[in-house]
Image (cartoon, grey):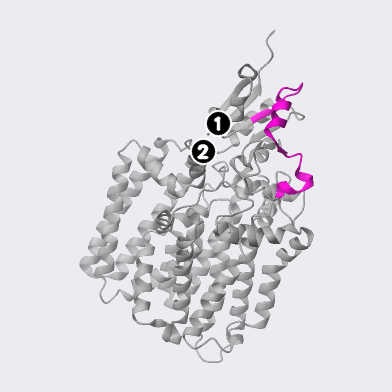
Amino acid sequence: MVGLAAVLLAPGLGRAPLDDPGEGQHAEIAREMRGGSWITPRLNGVRYFDKPPLLYWLTAASFGQWGFTERAARLAPLLGALLAVAGTTLLGARLLGPGGGLLAGAALLSCALFAAFARYVRPETLFVAAIQWGFTGLLWGLRRPRPGAPVAEFAVLGCVALGMAALAKDLLGLVGPLLAVATALWLGGRLRPMRAWLPATGVVLMLALGVGWYAAVAAAEPSFLWYTVVDNHVLNVARMRVFPDEDVPLSALEFLAAAGFGAFPWVLAAGAAVVALGRRRAWRDPAEAPWVALALWAVGVLGLFTLSPFKLPHYGLPAYPALALLAARAWREAAPRPRGLIGAHLVLFLLLGAGLGWAGSSDGRAFTSAVFGITDVYSRKEAAWGQASPYPPWSDIQPLLVRASILLLAGAAGLALAAARRSARAAAAVVAAVMLLTVPLVADGLAATSAARAVAGMAREIRARLAPDDVLVLEGPIENAGAVEFYSGHRPALLDGRRSVLGIGATFADAADTFWSPARFTEAWAGAKPPYLLTTRAPAQSIAAQLPPDSVRLLAVQNGRWLYGRAPAAR
């Protein structure tokens, strides 16, 4: 299954430019790490405390080996995806046999949101992989063939993986899975002795990996711990952050729609498995502890973020491996009476196939507004500013919808045949095959989106126009053009850029010259050597509208960005 994942995910990994916002800032952090600190990440030369360093360590190493390219930048997320598929397949084989393991791996691989982040420079797939290997290690021993069989090696592996989850994205990735496993064991009367599933060696390694970096940065940067624990978690959930960014959270319904469609159609079978576990009160059976732990984790993650006031589309991703495993179990248990599960998938395939076919025959405006308005963080930020986000050309998206529609309708026909034969195995194979065939469509859609809003083209314009000593000023958060230095070699000053991931970094004395006020920009604009202005804000909303009109010259417009220079004085 890992080989199939590589075949589906790796081709064309570097053909699209880095997406901005999204990928650019993370690639730039890794680039700056090559010549700076490997302990405290920096972006645009400013301290960056939002994410721990595992992604940046791996990407910086990749840059050192293969150069500063898009392909090298995306290798770490691809590695995370392959590891996540491997861990899911292995645990599935342990719990369900080889066939169930392959189905679980295929289910995770074919989740559209997972496949997208497998080719996207963010820490999400590394986080998912570490959590899944944590579950694999801790749950492996709960199905040991005889009492007293050695399981310490697997449990230690699980502990190490959870420590890596804290390094990949968040300490909650260490704590959450432990709570899910401990609760499942407690409900089944197997919590004690704890050393049977949580060996001391594993705990020491988990804490050393998971907490060591946080302790090192906290010792060097006194404000780091408060920002990470209080502002970025407690106050973020309460919507009372001291250093907020421009992200616009989803509503509960929008989050469930994004998480559900991102895991389509496997979330349906997973839900059936969770309901079945509840009906039979599986938590009372010690043998069901692994499944209870997975169900608690999947429901807990989705439920927590549904209720949380702040959530983004990808927050449901850590639940996907558990959903894939639960879906594989549901298909296995449906074998005696499969028509209900097959029929539900048949209806869903027909509805979605027909819907995508209808969307493909339209002008695309309703589809792009609805889909990007829910799933895309940048589109939501731009809408908050009252302006439209740059979308990929409909000519690039429309053929993908038509191909997806054909695949789903063909899958519906295959499901009808499986229903006639009353074969759950055939139906599961049809669902897996259809969804795996959609993975390249996800990659093509992601590439089209990145090309439509990347800063790479504008960076070429900057590199061609600006001399080494010219000043470039970026208006707004650095995230909106995070790769501008990566591509152009020019580090911008930031105008009105404190409401961003660099909000806390802006409080340090060595960042004072990076963040400009409108007054400073206006004064520099009128000086002997005026700066250039790069902005994602429409002309009427930019500081350019406040400058003397005859002093402003528009140099370039591309992908929702404007580049201005000062017009020469009239003779």
Residue at the extreme top of the image, as rendered: 571
Q: Is residue 47 visible?
A: no
Identify the mark nearer the N-term, 1 or 2. Answer: 2
Residue at 49 percent across and 69 percent down: it is 88
Secondary element type, mark 1: helix
Residue at 50 percent across and 37 percent down: it is 452
Mark 1: few/some/many CA within 10 Å (<14, 14-19, 20+): some
Mark 2: few/some/many CA within 10 Å (<14, 14-19, 20+): few
Residue carrying label 2: 385
Residue carrying label 1: 541
Left or right: 85 in relation to 368: right
Dot 2 amino acid type: Trp
Disc 1 to disc 2, C-alpha distance: 9 Å
Dot 1 amino acid type: Gln
Query: Magenta segment: does it hold 523?
Result: yes
Q: Position of residue 236 (x, y in %)?
A: 57, 57
158 or 234: which is nearer to us?
234
Secondary element type, mark 2: loop
Q: Where is residue 336 in the image (x, y as percent from the top left)?
A: 27, 77
Q: In which quarter of the image is residue 40?
A: bottom right
Left or right: 260 in relation to 533: left
**Range of residues picked out in magenta:** 505-533
Q: Quadrant of the C terminus?
A: top right
Left or right: 170 in relation to 90: right
Seen in the picture, residue 251 relative to 266 is either above or below; the reply is: above
Labels 1 and 2 touching (C-beta < 8 A): yes
Q: Position of residue 545 (x, y in %)?
A: 58, 25
Q: Is residue 3 visible?
A: yes
